[in-house]
Amino acid sequence: MAENQLAYVTDAMRRGWISGQGPYNDRAAELLAKVTGARHVLLCTSGTTALDLAALTFDPGPGDEIIMPSFTFVSSANAFVLRGAVPVFVDCRPDTLNIDEERIEAAITERTRAVMVVHYAGVACEMERIGKIAERYGLAVIEDNAHGLGGSYRGRPLGSFGSMAALSFHATKNVQCGEGGAVLLADDRLAERAEILREKGTNRRQFFRGQVDMYRWVDVGSAFQPSEIAAAHLAAQLEAFDEIQGRRHAVWNHYHQALAGWAKEQGVALPAVPDGCAHPAHLYYLLLPDLANRQALIGHLKERGVQAVFHYSPLHSSPAGRRYGRPAPGGCPVAENAADRLLRLPLYADLDESACARVVDAVTGYRVS
């Protein structure tokens, strides 16, 4: 828990202004702008609604295609499917599990409008190559940066490469408020429209700034803003961002160093962080040789009081993925393989050194069969 978390939440309740866009919403947005360098920050009620707002702002038409990784959470695709767009699922790289930039061009058609990147575990996608492809074909780049707050690519913050980026502050994220999110935008025109969409399609914020004499319904929209209570929680977490990140990196580094020898002996892959990428210590995962060993290790750890879970099921092979989207040429065999082999270890800021050592002891007591 961040130092000021309870005090800020209590203060928000006592102020009597608990709906959206109060002082704690403003404070959290200001802190996020400092971390990400974003020109415009719009807080949302979740990472999912942040993606919804981003997709609504981007405004794809029915049948327009959005290239995205298959190895991601369903919200990445749902945001665009809800607008009639078609997700085209591209396979992931075997090292970082990010979208394979070498497979993107083969997925582009005359209907393609954007490439969505997801920085898995907070490790950056190959943004230089992806940016050049997008520029060559006149495509937008949209970042699902739910894992990547605090990460960077060649010194530039994740969330600053696309025309817009979505963040998540779910309870499982590095910085959280139970449920929360944000959209980051650099373009003033897009930001102006996103602000209206977030205000149920009204120019209410312009009215409060004295830019119009009254506010009216001017566009489509919905309710995306978090309450002041959630924003107060988030603001306290963001003020403690460096401390939280330091503790998470200590856990990540402990695992990475302590498990290196065991992993090499057992044929287990550890997370890869390419040169030029700085990750935020969001996830620590193991890639076992096969599904049987992944499941056996989960059982082995459970018997020793350690909870470890798998992660995404590839979207291209899911019932809704087959109904609403399609895989890119060549399919997604790497994503299918990784989904069967991946296991996540406990990682949170309050995991102390003795608990880390217990996890490591439990893992290294397993032998691959």
Image: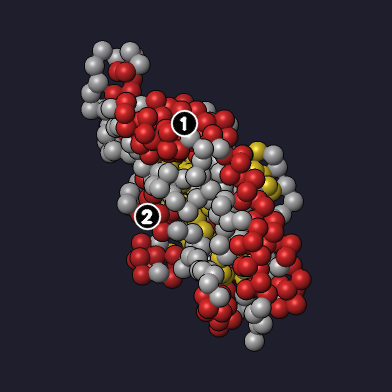
Q: Amino acid at mark 1?
A: Ala
Pinpoint residue 267: horizontal percent, then vertical percent: 71, 77
Choose mark 2 or mark 1, whichever is in front.
1
Q: Earlier in the sequence, mark 2 or mark 1?
A: 1
Residue hosting label 2 = 78
Q: Residues within 10 Å of mark 2 (few under 14, many from 20)?
A: many
Q: Amino acid at mark 2?
A: Asn
Picture quadrant where residue 288 is located: bottom right
Pinpoint residue 218: horizontal percent, then vertical percent: 26, 27
Q: CA distance from mark 2 to mark 1?
A: 25 Å
Q: Nearer the viewer, residue 212 or 84?
A: 212
Residue at (66, 68) in percent of width and height: 360
At mark 2, the secondary structure is helix
Q: Is residue 166 above or below residue 330?
A: above
Pinpoint residue 345: horizontal percent, then vertical percent: 57, 65
Q: Residues within 10 Å of mark 1 (few under 14, many from 20)?
A: many
Residue hosting label 1 = 29
Residue at (41, 59) in percent of width and height: 74
Res 292 seen here: yes
Residue at (25, 21) in percent of width and height: 215
Q: Is residue 74 above or below residue 238?
A: below
In this rendering, position of residue 195 left or right of residue 159: left
